[in-house]
Amino acid sequence: MGYVSAVPVPQPRAEAATAATSSRRSLAAALFLGAVGAVVVLLASGRTWAEGTAAVGGGSLPLGADGGDVTGVPTALAIVGLAALVAVFAVRRAGRLLVSALLALSGAGAALAAFLGASDSAALDEKAAQTTGDAAATVDALTHSAWPYVTVAGGLLILLAGLLALRYGKQWPAMSGRYERDGTPRPRKAPVVDPDRPEDLWKALDRGEDPTREA
């Protein structure tokens, strides 16, 4: 007596449901990471990154430099990243790929700029020169805070959002389906005019149509 082995039958619905779940998760993760990363960069860039003292009149004057004094690149790129995060859903195909790459590059650039500025002393030296009136003056007792590295972390979150968009963005929905792939609105069908109904004829004339023209 022979035995018939059961061959598993593919389940298209189950596979489609799994793909949809993966798409939703990647979309939610990208939105969360991108938004949080941009907020972290914007907030951390406004904090004090470096502190020191400048010699003035036989004494010392405390000075501080926030992220904007050191470098404005992370803030600018965080704003670009937010714009790219929104634009990802407004474009499709090649456009979405380019915007996703811009999102990733914005995060990488913000993180790199913040990392390079973590040990910077030029901003405080400039403040020391302005305070003392001596162009050669430099800051003393220089210390750095952890805020530049918090900014780096925010930039890396934006970078991760961009990488998710590059990997899964083609599966995400667009903002509106009213437009065709080439960006032009879909043509609307003209209302059917019944020649036996006078009201239809008058409405067609009001629209500038010729009701006697055959469709």
Image (tube, rainbow, N blue to C red):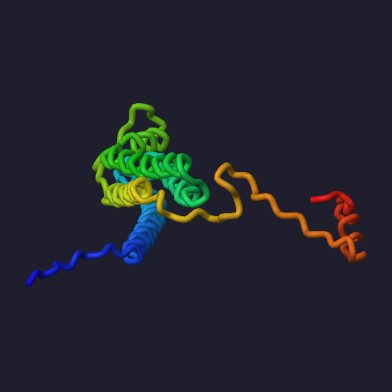
Q: Nearer the viewer, residue 66 or 158?
A: 158
Relative image position of residue 6 (x, y in whole percent): 17, 68
Residue shown at the point (64%, 50%) measured from the top left:
186
Q: Nearer the viewer, residue 134 or 50?
A: 50
Instruction: Locate residue 204 relative to residue 17 in the image: left or right.
Output: right
Relative image position of residue 113 (x, y in whole percent): 33, 39
Instruction: Locate residue 67 relative to residue 214 in the image: left or right.
Output: left
| Quarter of the picture holding the N terminus | bottom left
Answer whether residue 105 is visible to the viewer in this image. yes
Instruction: Locate residue 33 relative to residue 185 in the image: left or right.
Output: left
Residue 5 sits in quarter: bottom left
Q: Is residue 161 above or below residue 101?
A: below
Residue shown at the point (89%, 56%) measured from the top left:
206
Residue shown at the point (30%, 52%) measured from the top left:
150
Answer whether residue 155 is visible to the viewer in this image. no
Relative image position of residue 151 (x, y in whole percent): 33, 49
Q: Residue furthest bottom?
A: 1
Relative image position of residue 121 (x, y in whole percent): 30, 37
